[in-house]
Image: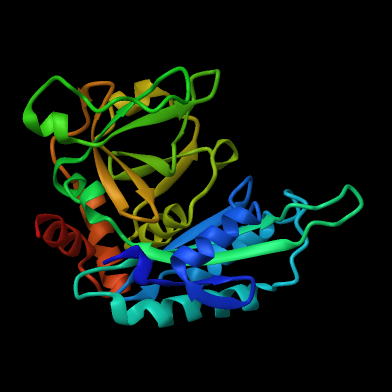
Amino acid sequence: MEQGGLQAYLNGKMMPYEDARASAQSKGLQEGGLYDRARTFNGKAFKLRRHLERLINSFAFAQIESSMSMVDLEEATLKVLETNLPLLSDGSEFVVTQLVSRGLASSLDETPEVNVFIYCEPLEFREFAAGYLTGVRLITPTTYGVPRQGSEGTREEREQQTLSLMSTPEGILTECEGANFMLVEDGRIKLPDRSNVLPGISMETVLELAEGLGIPIDEGEYSTYHAYKADEAFISSTRHCMLPVATINGLRVGTELPGPVTRRLLEAWRDLVEVDFVREALDASRS
């Protein structure tokens, strides 16, 4: 799908994506803006209202006073999806983004306008599809630098996505960049203390599914020691929902990929959205 064929929303108007992006850049919209993203299942945005609640809750922190309510943002987002839906081929999905920021003031006395840019783009399954089968590799660096893709090990290991698993100065595990992290031990989910992480909508979904399945959840402070002896581990984020963790700092996690608890949660998520998104991603990545 050509991005240029897509339509986007900018400050109350629908227009070609490329035109909207150029105008947004000229307004300084992409400099320090707030954003959120939701993905679709069968072309329908998943938990859109929850994503927008999180976005609006961050307005006060960024000192943004937008005239658009959550209902306004929801209507505009659904309009963008509806307009672009005919371009969505079978087995494909969208990621829809809301970007909000103050514009550039022409003088010190002028109050910058608030700009709203909403657009969708095809979900690139190839970036993560293999991870459903082979898992991802996590490392615990001392900085937020993104680790390089592995150049050693088996072919499967070299092709695994590699992510940083961050921790507090005291060595307490927190989250990956752009994803939440959870362990499983003795059939119980071990959730890192949410006061140390940014709880994602996908993480919330995992916890809701776990409750429905009767999977116990323990929230606390966990170190790499707990990670090394875990039966399984997984990460969650908007694009891929859940991916099993294969190794942490090169040490194998558990004996199955995905592990039994991760597999149950993935199956429950598929039932929730009525889409086999794992098969959808694998098929799209092979085409």
Look at the image and tell me in which quarter the N terminus lies: bottom left
In the figure, 260 relative to 75: above or below? above
Quadrant position of the C terminus in the picture:
bottom left
Q: Position of residue 204 (x, y in %)?
A: 46, 56
**Residue 99 in sight:** no
Quarter of the view holding residue 177: top left
Residue at position x 74%, y 52% from top?
Answer: 104
Q: Is residue 224 visible?
A: yes
Residue sitting at x 54%, y 18%: 170
Q: Nearer the viewer, residue 116 or 225?
A: 116
Q: Which residue is drawn at the image coordinates 58% and 54% (left, top)?
A: 25
State the image coordinates of residue 67 (x, y, percent, origin top left): 75, 71
Looking at the picture, does residue 40 appear above or below residue 220?
below
Residue 163 on image: x %, y %:
33, 33
Scheme of image coloration: rainbow
The foreground one among 253 and 45 is 45
Q: Residue at x 37, y 61 (%)?
A: 209
Q: Is residue 28 left or right of residue 270?
A: right
In the figure, residue 257 lies in which quadrant?
A: top left
Left or right: 126 with respect to 44? left
Image: 255 above or below 61: above
Q: Pinpoint residue 101: horizontal percent, then vertical percent.
A: 67, 55
Instruction: In the rendered view, tell whether residue 93 sits above or below residue 160.
Output: below
Question: Toward which corner of the image does residue 285 lie, by quadrant?
Answer: bottom left
Q: Nearer the viewer, residue 77 or 229?
A: 77
